[in-house]
Amino acid sequence: MDFSLSPEVEALRQRIRAFVEAEIMPLEADPANFDDHENISLSVLEPLRAKARDAGLWALQMPKERGGQGLPVAAMAACYEEMGRSIFGPVVFNSAAPDDGNMIVLEKVATEAQKTRWLQPIVDGKVRSAFAMTEPAPGAGSDPGLMLSRAERQGNAWILNGHKWFITGAGVAEHFIIVARTSEDQRKGLTAFLVHRDSPGLTIHRRIRIMGPEEHGGHCEVLLENLQVPDDDRLMEVGDGLKVTQIRLGTARLTHCMRWLGMSRRALEIAAPHVAERQSFGQPLAEHEGVQWLLGEAAMAIEVGRLLTMRAAVKLDSGDFARKEISMAKIQVSETLHKAIDTAIQLLGARGYSKDTPLEWMYRYARQARLVDGASEVHKMVLARSFLKDGVDFWSWER
């Protein structure tokens, strides 16, 4: 297997790296650049987004005819990793969740008319979006089959009623993809709909306070009360809601991994100069065996995550759903993110625990990685089922 990047992708990766280091990272140290929810302030973000667009670094995941860069998933892996080195990075390039995953699924499955109305404004950075599937118990979470929100057909429209929560970005989103139950069929019982924020019957009930820093728009509780949706705004066919969800979450899980790998690397980059310079018992920390073990284990875990992520990306590019490969990457990288940041904090001591570096911000952010887009335990179940089904072919080589 060849893991080398083409000269074009490598040049793009280097340009993104340079942009992040010159334009974005310096902003992290000034509290004035943060909003009330510990993300980059919109007044700071918008000029940066304009610079990224002018530099040809905008919406890497979208086709060139839509104003993006038309990268395959494997090339995205290398470039998203560079964006993720800054806590402000991905959103500057229009490559942050949830817009990233929403754009990808709409480009794949929406009609041309739907792409013009619902997708293009997100690509252009004019609106934000949200994907509304998760519900309070006993509704849908990691198991979409528990969906309680319903859509009933009335003539050429659908009436949606339900209760969603922890909907990322919903506080500022204008375009929503909402999944609701349309029948009791186990595989074909869900349908996805496109909804505008101003539609009567869609209410942002509250922004749920969370442990860590938040994406723009937070994580919200959303009520659907007799929400009328024209049939033209149905995404794919009736009963294809689970399919929409699977298509969206597959690549979205992997782009999370790409960004988290960049953050993991950044944590060790912060620790490296400290352990090289800080003296302890007559020698630099970096000369102590215990410190070397910590750094070596974290560095190896990051590299394992990169290899799993790239393998899954290549399989996606080949047309494979890469379910098992994505699950392996999601488990490895989500756990590595915490490991790398925790290691860096331990090595910096009190300074790592302070707000003098971004590490405490990153630490609080990292805890959600093992929950979002499927908890680690769910992905381990996917792997176990795959192994029990495939046997020794679970480890087969590509042909």
Image (cartoon, rainbow, N blue to C red):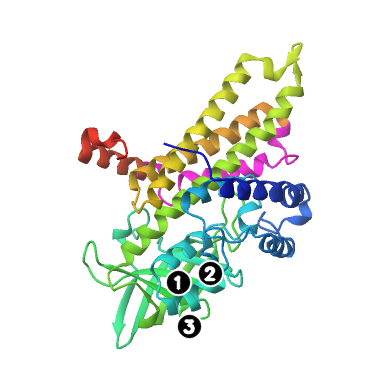
Location of residue 28 in the rendering, given as x and y in whole percent from the top left corner = 73, 48
Q: Tell me the magenta residue range.
A: 351-378
The residue wearing badge 2 is 65
Furthest residue in direction top, as rendered: 282
Q: CA distance from mark 3 to mark 2?
A: 34 Å
Q: Nearer the viewer, residue 142 or 96?
A: 96
Rendered residue at 64%/52% (across/down): 89
- Residue 341: image location, x then y, percent: 60, 36
Q: Quadrant of residue 49?
A: bottom right
Q: Which residue is mark 3?
A: 200
* Residue drawn at (25%, 42%) of the image: 385
- The mark nearer the N terminus, 1 or 2, is 2
Amino acid on which the number 3 mark rests in the picture:
Pro
Residue 372 can be seen in this image: no
- Secondary structure of residue under mark 1: strand
> Looking at this rendering, what residue extends furthest in the front direction?
7
Of callouts 3 and 2, which one flags the residue occurring earlier in the amino acid sequence? 2
